[in-house]
């Protein structure tokens, strides 16, 4: 569901792990540079930095990613119009980095991580589930345990107006699975019947994987785009030479 995305969190890995000691003039103190691109160093440096990095960097106009907020998000489901409001997503600061692969010469980076995430907010829903017409709305809470994500980035290098080099994201793709379990807690699915609401909620939780496959993609996409926006702002500010102690590959 939230492959959530972002869902993020480890999207920041190659910002965090490639800062060079003494040169990272703009890098926060919690970023511990690696002197090589070994998996062991990259994973540790990233893991050390995530809890603070996801709080955001106001001076770079980078928003918080834990928590991050969803003002309004429409989620098209089969037979149902579902809209999520005032969402608050937490959990990225406790993400566990499983692996990082760096192929600097190929401009390629791969990150794998897993997280427990919680999404709270309100919703309204109209449509039909099975034989039931739905006109509901209320508080919503969704919990994901051990959501797993793998992010594959292709980067490029660009020069700013001062002829300084910067990292730039050329393109990316991601894969994910919902891990161990997704729990749904949606209040008042049927405004006029608490018993029927509980029956449908039980059905949703018993069939959590099928429901999550349809429900989660829009939220994951939202999370990934938010994280990418933050990463791009970071790269626009901090030159390549302050992020990695290796000449740009030819």
Image (cartoon, rainbow, N blue to C red):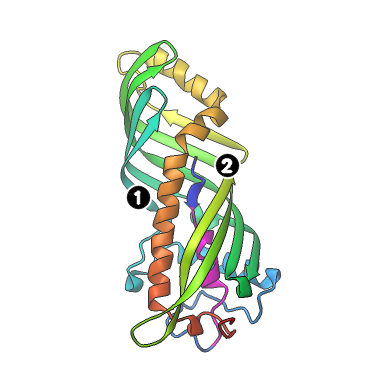
Give yes or no for residue 13 being in the magenta stretch: yes
Rendered image: mark on residue 236: none
Extreme front residue here? 250
Pointer 1: residues within 10 angstroms few (<14), some, or many (20+)?
A: many
**Is residue 21 placed above or below 123 in the rendered structure?**
below
Tag 2 or tag 1, which sits nearer the N-term? 1
Quarter of the image where the C terminus is located? bottom right
Residue 10 spot, x, y in % from top left:
54, 60
Q: Secondary structure at mark 1?
A: strand
What is the magenta range?
7-21
Give yes or no for residue 17 being in the magenta stretch: yes
Q: Secondary structure at mark 2?
A: strand
**Is residue 54 placed above or below 222 in the rendered structure?**
below
Residue drawn 47% across the image and 43% down it: 118
**Is residue 135 placed above or below 149 in the rendered structure?**
above
Q: State the residue in front, 164 or 31.
A: 164
Separation of marks 1 and 2 at Cα, in angstroms: 20 Å
Residue at the spot of label 2:
145
Residue drawn 46% across the image and 79% down it: 27
Residue 124 spot, x, y in % from top left:
31, 29
Residue drawn 60% across the image and 55% down it: 113
Residue drawn 37% across the image and 81% down it: 160
Residue 61 spot, x, y in % from top left:
32, 68
Residue 187 spot, x, y in % from top left:
37, 26
Residue at the spot of label 1:
69
Pointer 2: residues within 10 angstroms few (<14), some, or many (20+)?
A: some
């Amino acid at each position: 569901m939230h492959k959530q995305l972002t869902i993020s969190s480890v999207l920041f890995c190659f910002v965090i792990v490639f800062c060079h000691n003494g040169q990272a003039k703009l890098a926060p103190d919690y970023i511990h540079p690696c002197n090589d691109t070994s998996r062991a160093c990259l994973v540790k440096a990233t893991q050390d930095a995530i809890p603070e990095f996801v709080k955001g960097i106001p001076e770079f106009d980078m928003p918080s990613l834990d928590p991050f907020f969803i003002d309004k998000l429409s989620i098209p489901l089969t037979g149902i119009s579902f809209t999520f409001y005032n969402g608050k997503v937490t959990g990225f600061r406790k993400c566990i980095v499983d692996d990082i692969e760096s192929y600097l010469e190929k401009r390629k980076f791969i990150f794998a991580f897993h997280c427990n995430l919680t999404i709270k907010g309100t919703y309204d829903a109209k449509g039909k589930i099975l034989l039931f017409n739905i006109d509901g709305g209320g508080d919503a809470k969704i919990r994901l345990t051990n959501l797993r994500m793998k992010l594959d980035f292709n980067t490029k290098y660009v020069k700013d107006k001062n002829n300084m080099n910067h990292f730039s994201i050329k393109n990316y793709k991601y894969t994910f699975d919902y891990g161990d379990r997704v729990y749904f807690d949606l209040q008042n699915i049927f405004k006029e019947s608490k018993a029927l609401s509980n029956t449908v909620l039980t059905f949703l939780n018993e069939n959590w994987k099928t429901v999550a496959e349809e429900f989660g993609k829009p939220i994951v996409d939202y999370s990934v785009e938010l994280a990418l926006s933050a990463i791009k702002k970071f790269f626009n500010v901090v030159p390549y030479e302050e992020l990695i102690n290796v000449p740009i590959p030819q």
